[in-house]
């Protein structure tokens, strides 16, 4: 009887280990080829994304490269099953200067486009992008003070509509740039918080253009959101109104 009990215990442990193993394998496959979770640590995409947002990125949207794999293991040459993002997509990508870092920005310039910012206005291929002033966005600074920030609806040439902020009006540090022509196979990225975003406009820039092989995936929807300035046990700081919202 004692040996039978021992065999049952041993079999139970082996079954548990097998279950855990396959659960890990399935999770890695989903993370690699379908959806990967990311969190937002900075305010460069406010008002679209807030600090403390957690979202899923679709890995299959633009195909797969080595950066689709854990730790960017170089098993995929170039990019396979590739498709280009659309103008206005919110994209996670590996920083060209340091692929260990993930950035999230909006695609503004496609291959062959000329992009420029003049007095705060975005120009694509010489045409000024339409924007309309709406109600101010109430931004909370580091000291907890509420600040009213100019907010606009921007409409890109393909009809994609999104909100942007101009904290310093039209005279921010990146509100006047030279024209940039996007090379083949690359993209020009900008944050929606235009005066508080290190992106393709910045000089000196950690990246000017993002190569297609550095794209990780398209931001799809939020699955959790919490004011990260509040303690983790503070349930009142969970932003329930943002849960399961799509990223536009």
Image (tube, helix red, strand yellow):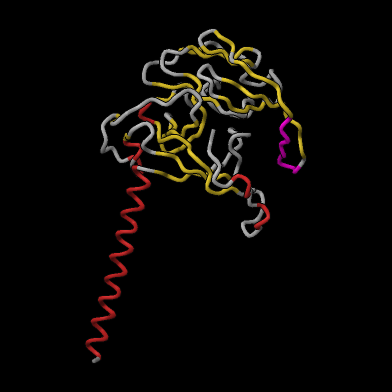
Question: Is 143 covered by the magenta stretch?
Answer: yes
Q: Residue at x 66, y 52 (%)?
A: 237
Q: Nearer the viewer, residue 20 or 60?
A: 60
Q: Quadrant of the C terminus?
A: top right
Q: Residue at x 53, y 24 (%)?
A: 160
Spot occupied by residue 115 in the image (x, y as percentages of width and height): 52, 14
The answer to whether residue 119 is above or below residue 5 is above
Question: Is 96 covered by the magenta stretch?
Answer: no
The answer to whether residue 211 is above or below residue 12 is above
Q: Quadrant of the N terminus?
A: bottom left
Q: Is residue 175 left or right of residue 61?
A: right
Q: Nearer the viewer, residue 197 or 36?
A: 36
* Residue that protrudes farthest toward the top in the picture: 126
Spot occupied by residue 104 in the image (x, y as percentages of width and height): 50, 34
Q: Nearer the viewer, residue 118 or 97?
A: 118
Q: Residue at x 46, y 37 (%)?
A: 102
Spot occupied by residue 238 in the image (x, y as percentages of width and height): 63, 52
Q: Which residues are magenta?
A: 136-144
The answer to whether residue 167 is above or below residue 236 is above
């Amino acid at each position: 009887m004692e040996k039978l009990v021992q065999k049952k215990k041993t079999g139970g442990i082996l079954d548990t280990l097998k279950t855990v193993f396959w659960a890990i394998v399935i999770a890695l496959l989903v993370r690699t080829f379908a959806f990967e979770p990311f969190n937002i640590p900075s305010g460069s995409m406010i008002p679209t994304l807030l600090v403390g947002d957690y979202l899923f990125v679709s890995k299959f949207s633009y195909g797969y490269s080595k950066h689709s794999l854990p730790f960017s293991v170089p098993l995929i040459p170039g990019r396979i099953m590739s498709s280009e993002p659309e103008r206005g997509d919110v994209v996670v990508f590996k920083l060209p200067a340091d692929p260990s870092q993930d950035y999230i920005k909006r695609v503004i310039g496609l291959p062959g486009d000329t992009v420029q910012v003049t007095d705060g206005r975005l120009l694509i291929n010489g045409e000024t992008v339409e924007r309309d002033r709406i109600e101010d966005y109430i931004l909370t600074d580091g000291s907890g003070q509420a600040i009213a920030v100019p907010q606009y609806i921007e409409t890109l040439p393909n009809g994609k509509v999104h909100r942007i902020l101009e904290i310093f009006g039209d005279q921010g540090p990146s509100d006047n740039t030279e024209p940039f022509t996007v090379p083949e196979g690359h993209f020009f990225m900008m944050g929606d918080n235009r005066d508080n975003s290190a992106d393709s406009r910045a000089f000196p820039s950690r990246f000017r253009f993002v190569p297609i092989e550095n794209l990780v995936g398209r931001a799809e929807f939020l699955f959790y959101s919490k004011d990260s300035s509040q303690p983790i046990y503070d349930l009142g700081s969970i932003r329930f109104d943002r849960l399961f919202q799509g990223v536009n």
